[in-house]
Image: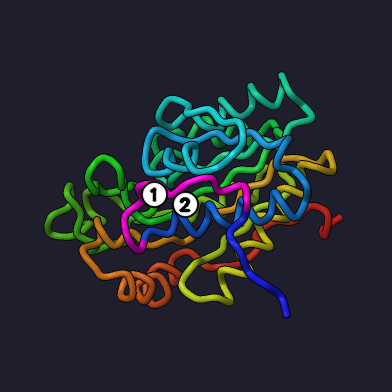
Amino acid sequence: MKVLKKPEMIERQVGWCGGCGHGIIQRLVAECCEELDLVEKTVQVVDIACAYWSIDALNCDGIAGPHGRCAAVATGIKNVRPGANVYVHAGDGCSYVIGLSETCFAAMRDVPITMIVVNNGIFGMTGGQMCLATTLTGDKTKSTKTGRDERSTGKPSDMLKIMQNFDIEYAARGALYDSKHIIETKKMIKKGFENQRDGKGFSIIEVLSPCPTNWNLNPVDSMKKIKEENEKIFPVKVYKDRGVEE
């Protein structure tokens, strides 16, 4: 019988809200690093936002980059320490709005890092404002009090459709709303780390994640929203796998 236990890489409990998906992602990262024997080689780059808690939770080197600049910071670290397992843990606002150019340029250069983007459809740490890339049409936020209106703010965008057109190694989207999808998401994250370990190029893994606090929903209904609403706009699948295509 297999005994399940907390990964040793997780050092302490941190301050994510109840029902938040960041903690699940953090555990998946820790499990993958331990299973691939990458803990001592790992350097995490987190955003000055909800993902920041990870730098306090995990026993590995880490840097908190300026808001939205995680991909650029990770690129610099990888250039200086090419043997390190460098990964980004950042939100959708950081990666696809404020830091869109940094994310795209890292992809265009096929920088051999692993980027994990938490898609919770909102700017979480700053109080729950609309995220231009991922907030669903009609969703109410602090900056769209009557619901997102496509006439004034446009539609949410599937950024992985853009990323797959760059000559990158891997692009995939997972979800956290049930155990099956959590297991599949872990496989995607591990694939991103394996690509980097094996000297391959840029990997981006987006994860559909709940934000009960800013969605004004309980954790169970937040997971239901991801399954019934968010996944219709942001399909869970592998968008690009260069190794398979070749």
Specify the amino acid type for callout 2: Val
- For badge 1, the amino acid type reads Ala
Residue drawn at the location 21% of the way across and 63% of the way down: 216
Q: Is residue 21 above or below residue 220?
A: above
Task: Residue 134: name its quadrant.
Answer: bottom left
Residue under pointer 2 = 118
Residue at (35%, 47%) from the top-left corner?
A: 15
**Viewer-proximal residue among 8 and 171:** 8
Q: Can residue 12 be found in the magenta stretch?
A: yes
Please tell me which of labels 2 and 1 falls first in the chain.
Answer: 2
Whether label 2 touches label 1, CB < 8 Å: no
> Quadrant location of the N terminus?
bottom right
* SS for dot 2: strand
Residue 133, disc: 1
Q: Assess whether residue 224 is covered by the magenta stretch.
A: no
Kindly identify the residue that appears in the image at 26 percent across and 70 percent down. 218
The part of the chain drawn in magenta is 8-19
